[in-house]
Image (spheres, helix red, strand yellow):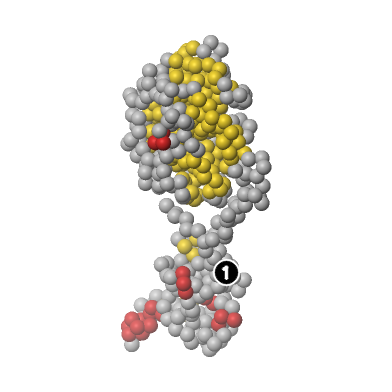
Amino acid sequence: MAIKLRNEYGPVLHMPTSKENFKEKGPQNASDSYGHKQYPANQGQEVEYLVTGTHPYPPGPGVALTADTKVQRMPSESAAQSLAVALPTSQTRGDTNRSAPAGGEYRHPGASDRAQPAGAVVMEGGNAKNSALMAKKAPTMPKPQWHPPWKLYRVISGHLGWVRCIAVEPGNQWFVTGSADRTIKIWDLASGKLKLSLTGHISTVRGVIVSTRSPYLFSCGEDKQVKCWDLEYNKVIRHYHGHLSAVYGLDLHPTIDVLVTCSRDSTARIWDVRTKASVHTLSGHTNAVATVRCQAAEPQIITGSHDTTIRLWDLVAGKTRVTLTNHKKSVRAVVLHPRHYTFASGSPDNIKQWKFPDGSFIQNLSGHNAIINTLTVNSDGVLVSGADNGTMHLWDWRTGYNFQRVHAAVQPGSLDSESGIFACAFDQSESRLLTAEADKTIKVYREDDTATEETHPVSWKPEIIKRKRF
């Protein structure tokens, strides 16, 4: 008989007994014929228990609500037992003989969200997301900040080939462009007049940048060369040798004398500006590296490549910290927000926003269905994307709202097919936007002073938006 009791009732002897229970006096312990304790009885006090089901406490990460709707995370057996005992009377009234917990008390992993009542606790991956959730609302786009539209007010001609890159000097007096005609030209920012032409590259100039720490201009091109120009003498004073193919972009570190270049040879290289030494060769991409950006915070180097990935690099070790594989097509443009710890990347499939330091995905900016060559952003949160087909879209950074689309007419005498935007940049005051284009011109835009929220309203509705989380 003892063996039969152990076999048939042993699994449930540890469970609480029914509410219509009894007073226990004196130490009594239920044990089987082998002397193993199964359930210790309490001594000398009245105990009330409630049967919450005919099976042990649910193994999934779901826990019943306590009286003040607080949730315990991943309870131990003793905590689960105490929760079962301490259910509020409003839930226990008339339920002493029920055979299973109500559907609103816990949720097994993978259970449908449709069955969740308004007061249910939804727990995912073992972590409580909210205590006492209200009915879930679909995500909506918040109302975007109003930005005045930008209008074209100047077209600058002078190059004899595609204008591939552009940079504004820190003093905001002039800007520099590099072109497929193998020249670098310096222009007066206020008047748009040509100040100087620099020759020395023997192929298309693909990148230019002006140093904030010294009177140096750096350039790179499809001739595999990286040059440092002294602007006091307008001469090349250093060459940085090492890339095995065309150099597509470059950037300067904001706080240390380090230059970073990226190339069609699938690598990025870190150079000591003064000694011309190659500090690191950043290997890992499997196709041409199209863009590189530096910042003072970690990660200090970000690259985008034709292999569809973005890599965040450890500058000291020269190794990859994180690889972002969300894009489906080549990444030709990366831009860092000047104030927020975030950045954006441009690809023909989407513009994506990311959060540093680990590259957490924020949102997609969809609608610019073209090959995006360039991105730039100002401190007011205006993001500009320029594409191969000559279109330029302007976005509100925070919400991803596309508030303006521009397709400027090509230069007279150029082919319609030559309407591509290769680079764009805001000047230091952020009041002018400059674009380098395939019709051999530089176009200058500025905000429309006559525009107001009434004349150019935000055509926004709090519609349900679908954000891809990948």
Is any part of residue 91 visible from this angle? yes
Q: Position of residue 76 (x, y in %)?
A: 48, 66
Total count of labels: 1
Residue placed at 50% from the left, 38% from the top? 408
Farthest residue toward the front? Answer: 413
- The residue under label 1 is 134
Residue 58 occupies quadrant: bottom left
The answer to which of 313 and 190 lies nearer the viewer is 190
The answer to which of 65 and 364 lies nearer the viewer is 364
Residue 22 occupies quadrant: bottom right
The answer to which of 424 and 466 lies nearer the viewer is 424
Residue 112 occupies quadrant: bottom left
Q: Is residue 385 above or below residue 63?
A: above
Residue placed at 32% from the left, 36% from the top? 286
The answer to whether residue 202 is left or right of residue 105 is left
Is any part of residue 77 visible from this angle? no
Type of the residue with mark 1: Met
Residue placed at 41% from the left, 78% from the top? 55
Q: Position of residue 453 (x, y in %)?
A: 66, 50
Q: Is residue 461 above or below residue 296?
A: below
Secondary structure under the numbered disc 1 in the rendered image: loop
Q: Position of residue 9 (x, y in %)?
A: 38, 83
The answer to which of 331 and 131 lies nearer the viewer is 331
Q: Position of residue 194 (x, y in %)?
A: 54, 19
Residue placed at 35% from the left, 36% from the top? 285
Farthest residue toward the top? Answer: 233
